[in-house]
Image (tube, helix red, strand yellow):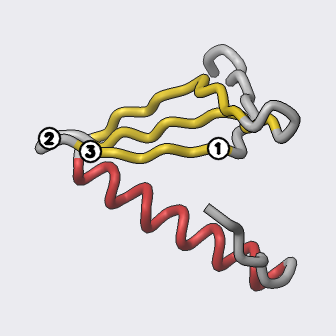
Amino acid sequence: MGEPLEGRYANYFELGFTAFEFLFDFGQFDQDTESAIRHTRIIANPTSARVFLKMLADVVAEYEAKVGPIGEAQR
């Protein structure tokens, strides 16, 4: 196995795309200063973005089946 993965907390997200890539920016929002600091950008091709979307939907559905519904968040 390789090196252990670094874990980063994220409660702030920005998404975008170009003709060839999807951009996923992750960061932390600070309520005290009402600002966000982006710390990680993931760049994926459209096929990989579609796979990520399906995987995320599946894991959220599994979570809700085991733990309960997730409340709606504000954007």
Q: Are marks 3 and 1 in contact (CB under 8 Å)?
A: no
The residue under the point 43% across, 33% down is 42
- Estimate how packed mark 1 is, as few (under 14), some (14 to 19) or many (20 or more) residues with alpha carbons within 10 Å: some
Q: Amino acid at mark 3?
A: Phe
Residue 25 lies left or right of residue 10; in this view the side is left
* Placement of 21 over or under 75, stated as above or below: above
Q: Which mark is residue 12?
A: 1
First-in-chain label (3 vs 1): 1
Answer with left or right where residue 69 lies relative to residue 74.
Answer: right
* Vertical order, 33 against 68 (above or below): above
Q: Nearer the viewer, residue 73 or 44?
A: 73
- Residue placed at 78% from the left, 83% from the top? 69
Task: Give the labeled residue for mark 3.
Answer: 17
Give the number of the disc on residue 20. 2
Instruction: State the separation of the CA atoms marked 3 and 1.
Output: 17 Å
Q: Quadrant of residue 10?
A: top right
- Please state, as top left, top right, bottom left or bottom right, where the N terminus lies in the image: top right
Residue 57 coordinates in the image, percent (x, y): 53, 71
Q: Image height check: is 30 above or below 22? A: above
Instruction: Inspect the image, locate mark 2, and give the three-letter code of the amino acid beneath it.
Output: Phe
Residue at the image position 75 percent from the left and 73 percent from the top: 63
Of the two numbered discs 1 and 2 in the rendering, the one whose residue sits closer to the viewer: 1
First-in-chain label (1 vs 2): 1
| Quarter of image, res 65 | bottom right
Q: Secondary structure at mark 3?
A: strand
Query: In the structure shown, which secondary structural element does the residue marked by tag 2 occupy?
Result: loop
Report x, y in % for residue 64.
Answer: 75, 80
Q: Amino acid at mark 1?
A: Tyr
